[in-house]
Image (cartoon, grey):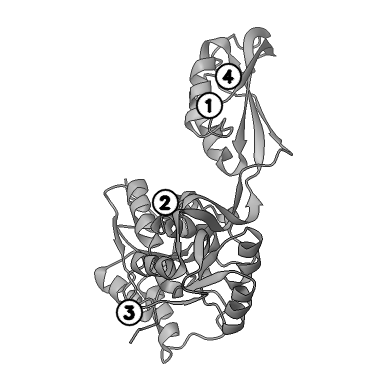
Amino acid sequence: MKVTVADVVRAMDAIAPPHMAMEGDRIGLQLGDPGRPVEKLVVTLEVTPSVADRAVAWGADMIVAHHALLFRPLAELRWDKPRQAMIAKLVAQRVAFFAAHTNLDCAPGGVNDVIAERLGLVRPELLDVTGRDRLVKLVVFVPTSHVDVVRQALGDAGAGHIGAYSHCTFAAPGTGSFKPGPGTHPYIGQEGKLELVDEVRLETIAYERDLDRIVASMLAAHPYEEVAYDVYPLAVPGRAFGIGRVGVLPEPMELEAFVDLVRLAFHLPHLRYAGHPRSRVQKVALLGGSGSGWIPHALAQGADVFVTADVSHHQAADAVHDGLAIVDVPHAALEAPVCEGVARRLSDALGPSVEVRVDVEGVDPWRFV
């Protein structure tokens, strides 16, 4: 069975759910036909003219990137301007393009979790809560003969998660009634005859974003031709998601030693930082990309040091005066490691018919001397 652009989009939406994106972000399918087959897929941080040239030369059908290809509206599309010519080339070669930006920052296993893992942080938590998954109550009425199989199908599809527990449901017995109409093929009963059946009201909770998959699994396991079920929105707050992470180092260390740890973790020859080299650090805040706007959040959470990118002179000076050291990692170097994880997860989801390649060569414009 062929994999299509739409299949890649579904896989990416599972990795980086679109509802986690921050307001105004440009994410999703920006070029391409959802029905077009995909056999070769490139994962990158952002598309540069060189990345596009290599993708086309390789015969790529689709590119998945962290940074959007089309962020601001195009006023023109000219072949004498390199970036615009790059877009025109991708269109001419029918290469699809998909972006997962702040949703990949916020998602479990995304940009910020990868950074936290590289730094060896213990018990990382959210730096800033930007939203919560919405919860719903799913209720289905099941004949007693199929309660176990429907319960299992619901849990296996992702329903019934409460904290560290899965497959959580509640069942209450009752009597269901129905009269099969003309042309029906009831599992229980006869056409035109009112039936009273021992049934169970089986209820569970689910995240709204998973509801389509869970309902499909429930319907496949249920024996009835027409399944009676209800979905109710819940006021109970769901799982929080957000930008950045805060965690602790296994042991405290001096700032200068921590900066060297960061430098080695991201394979950099040099690194700039602000703060006293001998100061003690253990609680670490981080945010992939341009995170200077979250310096107040790092201070509020009692971090000793904040690892991010694109910090200005005045922002760094003010942070140090307030007691927060800053480690400024080049933007691309900080975010590019997520591409390997995305590629592995896409390869697992799409199967052996799709060849997935990571290409981050030359995406960082900064050089060191």
Q: How far across and how far down the image is residue 133, in percent?
A: 62, 46
Q: Which residue is mark 4?
A: 184
Residue drawn at point x = 56 percent, y = 67 percent: 26
Could you say which disc has been placed on residue 50 in the image?
Answer: 3
Q: Secondary structure at mark 2?
A: helix
| Chain-order first, disc 3 or disc 2 | 2
Mark 1 secondary-structure assignment: loop
Counting residues from the N terminus, which is met first, the one under dot 4 or under dot 1? 1
Q: Earlier in the sequence, mark 2 or mark 4?
A: 2
Q: Amino acid at mark 4?
A: Thr
Residue 85 image point, x, y percent: 41, 84
Residue 7 is marked as 2
Q: Residues within 10 Å of mark 2 (few under 14, many from 20)?
A: some
Tag 3 near tag 1, CB within 8 Å: no
266 relative to 193 in the view: left or right: left
Residue 98 found in image quarter: bottom left
Distance Cα–Cα, label 2 vs label 4: 35 Å
- Res 245 seen here: yes
At a point 52% along the width and 63% down the height, the residue shown is 286
Residue toward you, 133 or 88: 133
Q: Residues within 10 Å of mark 1 (few under 14, many from 20)?
A: some
Crowd rating for badge 4 (residues with CA inside 10 Å; few <14, some 14–19, many 20+) = few
CA separation in Å, label 3 and label 2: 26 Å
Q: Position of residue 319 (x, y in %)?
A: 61, 74
With respect to residue 338, does 179 lie above or below? Answer: above
Q: Could you tell me if the residues under marks 3 and 2 are in contact, i.e. CB atoms within 8 Å?
A: no
Q: Which tag, 2 or 1, sits closer to the chain's start?
A: 2
